[in-house]
Structures are given as structure tokens and as C-alpha cells.
């Protein structure tokens, strides 16, 4: 998978895909705003490529299908760029994240690799983020297609999980369904009995009675749009009473968050509304204590929810993350450095057309419990002896995808089983 003739799977840059619609490698494009022209650059296929990889229509034909009538060989890109630089014109480009692109831009613009990364255009970043943040009707329909396939992936995982299976079997079936839907997975599948680890991609464990299984998986359509869902379900036919206790708190958190979605409401406020429900729920179990407002300000809730409530979603499952979270998720406002809150990817006021995830979680992380106990962090808000009784519980998370409308929030795609009754009914089937 890591040499020239067997390279990593190609996935087109999302902004290139958004503006030019061509999902093939070795292409470049220039929009000349002053001249009002758009040019796609690329070289026609060699006979060696055709023999080994198959034929494609000419670049001119492919470009015409997406509304671009001017195509030139890749060598002409350097000539056009050199003329623009010589004329003192500004050349805007988005932050590169592939090493080969950094090198290519350096050669075109006469910059070192460090200078390339520093010279990415703030004006272009902002313009692209502003446009891509507001999803068109066509984009929403494509995202719903991705979400519907994602729901099928989760339903399959819930149905098939049985004691004695490996996590790998469930992950493989989930990925098969994504491929069967005409696309691929939107991100590496998380399928684990160790839900307390937020992004665990290992699938080595054998699942057993009494385990909770956390599945975080989404499909990407052939056009590149993503779905992102998380489910947690028992490996046993039913939730235990202990598991039900935490799951009910989580569902209440989720319902509070989704009912809070509305234009003009900062997503940071939705995040804290969710964290409040979690804190109060843990307070009812004797785990948390003290004044809720003071505890939230101190970040005590991050003991059991150390991540943000959600993120923007679209052509990237974490939409436009390469453009910068401060631009995309914070509208230029600075991020917090507080543990937990610093992982909130979206905080800005919501606007119609935004597509985002809502994914509260409750996690019991032994290493974090031990660290905070040892240094006394937030000790006035946490009963560590009570907390310690849950150290082997694991973690739970529920996630679905929402569109912000003029009236509030609308769940995208068909409903995923998430109540205790719905999950147990599917497990029994």
C-alpha cells in the first residue's frame, strides 16, 4: 500500500471536489477572479496507465461535464503562475496538508515548505468556509443518503453482535454495507467494548455477555458526502440495570441538546446545556456534588464527558477541518484551552443551512479518574470514592446528524434505534 504502483487509496480534496466535481488524481485548477476564467490542468493518460488502470475520457470532456471549458496540460500551470507572480498579482491557495502539494506549491511560487504553510490565504479560507458551511438542497439530499446508509450500518451491528464474536467481525460487516451503498466509510470504524477510549480503532477483543459495545461509524457517498453516527448497545440481549441508568442519563442529555438547536444559538451554549444534564445526572448518583454552575465553569463535567458535543459535517466528516477549527467552528473567536472544552469543535452561533452532529457521551476513564484524584483536581465537585465504583463501566455515546433550519434543527436521514426499548427489540430480532 505504500509504494508508487500500489499507493494509498486516493480521495479527492474536499474543496476541489466541491468546486470542480472531479474525483480523479493529478489535476489542478485555477480560478482567475479578475479575468473571470476557470482552468483545469492535467495530462492525458499514457498507454501504460490505460493498460494497467483502464481508460478515462479526456480531461477536456471530464471538465466540460462540470462546466469548465478551459483545460491545459499540467506544465501550463507553472507558466500561468509565473506570469501572475511576475505581475505582482496575489496567488491565493488553501492550506495544503499533503506533502506532495506543499512541494508543488513551493516550486510554483518560489517558497520554502515552511513559507507555503504560512502563506495560505486567509481571505480564501474564509470565503470557502463561508460558502461550504451553508449546505444547498442538493447537498442535504446527498448527506441524507449517506446518513441512511449509516443507519443501516448501525442496525447491522446491533443485530449481529453475539458473545464470542470478535470486534473485527462487526467492523467488517459495517464497512461492507458502506461499500455496498456505492461509496465507502467516511472515517475509520470505531467498534469496541472499550467505549471509554474515545477514538479506539483497534478491533482485537472478543465480546462477551455483560459488555457494552460502542459503534461509531458513517458512510460516505460516491459524491463524497458523509454521515456520522454512534450507537451503544449491550452484547447481552438486554441492558443491565446499571447500564440502563447511564443510558437514560445520556438519552436525556441528547434530547436536551437537540431541542436546543436553533438559528442564532451558539453551539457552545448547546454543549453546556448537555453538560448540565450530565452533571445533574451524575449528581443524582452521588458521583458529582456542589453547585452545578460553578462545576461547569471549572470543567468538572469533563471527567465523564471530555469532548465537545459535535462538529460541522458535509464533504468531510469533520467538515473543513483542514481550514482550521477557529475559522469553521468559532467564526474567528479564540478557543478555550480548558480540558474538555478545548475539544469542542463547534461553538459559533448556528445558522440555517449548517449541518452538524450531536454526540454526547458518558465515559469512565480509569486513568483520568486516578490522575484527578491524585492531584485533587475538581475535588470539591467530585466524590472520587463513588466515582471509583464505576471505573470498569466503560463508556457510552449516542450521535445523530442535524440540519439547522429557520425553525430549529431537523434530524437528517431515518431514525436510528436509540431508546432502550428500540435497541433491545432490534437485538431480540
Image: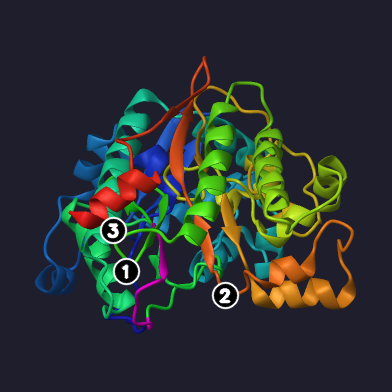
Q: Quadrant of the N terminus?
A: bottom left
- Mark drawn on residue 358: none
Do the residues under discs 1 and 3 have CB atoms within 8 angstroms? no
Q: Quadrant of residue 271?
A: top right
In percent of the image, x 64 and y 71: which residue is there? Answer: 365
**Residue under label 2:** 392
* Magenta range: 204-216
Q: State the separation of the CA atoms marked 1 and 3.
A: 29 Å
Q: State the separation of the CA atoms marked 2 and 3.
A: 22 Å
**Residue under label 3:** 158
Q: State the separation of the CA atoms marked 1 and 2.
A: 38 Å
Q: Quadrant of the C terminus?
A: bottom left
Question: Taking 170 as reference, is 418 left or right?
Answer: right
Q: Residue furthest top?
A: 407
Question: Taking 272 as reference, is 355 left or right?
Answer: left
- Whether residue 144 appears in this view of the structure is yes
Q: Position of residue 7 (x, y in %)?
A: 32, 76
Q: Position of residue 113 (x, y in %)?
A: 65, 69
- Mark drawn on residue 9: 1
- Whether residue 72 appears in this view of the structure is no
In percent of the image, x 86 and y 52: which residue is there? Answer: 298
Q: Position of residue 363 (x, y in %)?
A: 60, 62
In percent of the image, x 64 and y 41: which residue is there? Answer: 274
Amino acid at each position: 500500500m505504500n509504494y508508487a504502483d500500489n499507493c494509498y487509496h486516493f480521495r479527492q480534496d474536499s474543496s476541489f471536489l466541491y468546486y470542480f466535481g472531479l474525483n480523479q488524481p493529478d489535476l489542478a485548477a485555477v480560478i482567475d477572479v479578475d479575468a473571470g476564467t476557470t482552468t483545469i490542468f492535467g495530462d492525458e493518460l499514457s498507454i501504460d496507465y490505460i493498460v494497467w488502470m483502464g481508460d478515462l475520457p479526456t480531461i477536456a470532456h471530464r471538465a466540460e461535464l462540470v462546466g469548465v471549458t478551459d483545460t491545459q496540460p499540467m506544465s501550463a500551470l507553472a507558466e500561468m503562475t509565473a506570469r501572475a507572480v511576475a505581475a505582482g498579482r496575489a496567488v491565493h491557495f488553501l492550506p495544503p496538508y499533503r506533502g506532495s502539494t506543499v512541494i508543488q506549491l513551493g516550486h510554483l511560487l518560489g517558497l520554502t515548505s515552511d513559507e507555503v504553510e504560512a502563506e495560505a490565504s486567509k481571505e480564501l479560507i474564509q470565503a470557502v468556509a463561508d460558502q461550504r458551511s451553508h449546505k444547498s438542497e442538493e447537498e442535504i439530499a446527498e448527506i441524507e443518503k449517506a446518513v441512511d446508509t449509516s443507519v443501516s450500518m448501525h442496525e447491522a451491528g446491533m443485530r449481529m453482535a453475539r458473545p464470542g464474536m470478535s470486534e473485527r467481525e462487526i467492523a467488517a460487516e459495517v464497512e461492507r454495507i458502506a461499500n455496498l451503498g456505492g461509496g465507502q466509510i467516511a472515517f475509520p470504524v470505531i467498534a469496541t467494548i472499550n467505549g471509554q477510549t474515545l477514538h479506539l480503532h483497534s478491533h482485537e477483543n472478543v465480546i462477551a455477555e455483560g459488555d457494552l459495545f460502542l459503534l461509531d461509524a458513517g458512510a460516505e457517498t460516491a459524491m463524497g458526502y458523509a454521515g456520522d453516527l454512534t450507537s451503544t448497545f449491550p452484547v447481552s440481549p438486554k441492558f443491565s440495570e446499571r447500564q440502563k441508568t447511564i443510558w437514560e442519563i445520556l438519552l436525556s442529555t441528547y434530547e436536551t441538546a437537540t431541542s436546543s438547536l436553533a438559528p442564532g444559538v451558539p453551539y457552545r451554549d448547546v454543549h453546556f446545556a448537555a453538560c448540565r444534564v450530565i452533571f445533574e445526572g451524575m449528581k443524582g448518583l452521588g458521583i458529582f456534588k456542589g453547585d452545578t454552575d460553578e462545576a461547569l465553569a471549572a470543567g468538572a463535567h469533563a471527567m465523564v464527558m471530555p469532548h465537545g458535543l459535535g462538529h460541522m459535517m458535509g464533504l468531510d466528516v469533520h467538515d473543513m477541518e483542514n481550514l482550521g477549527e477557529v475559522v469553521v467552528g468559532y467564526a474567528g473567536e479564540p478557543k478555550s484551552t480548558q480540558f474538555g472544552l478545548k475539544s469542542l469543535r463547534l461553538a459559533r452561533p448556528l445558522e440555517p443551512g449548517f449541518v452538524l452532529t450531536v454526540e454526547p457521551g458518558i465515559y469512565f476513564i480509569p486513568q483520568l479518574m486516578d490522575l484527578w484524584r491524585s492531584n485533587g483536581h475538581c475535588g470539591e465537585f467530585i466524590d472520587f470514592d463513588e466515582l471509583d465504583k464505576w471505573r470498569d463501566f466503560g463508556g457510552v455515546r449516542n450521535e445523530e446528524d442535524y440540519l439547522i433550519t429557520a425553525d430549529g434543527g431537523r434530524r437528517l436521514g431515518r431514525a436510528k434505534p436509540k431508546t432502550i426499548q428500540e435497541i433491545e427489540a432490534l437485538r431480540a430480532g
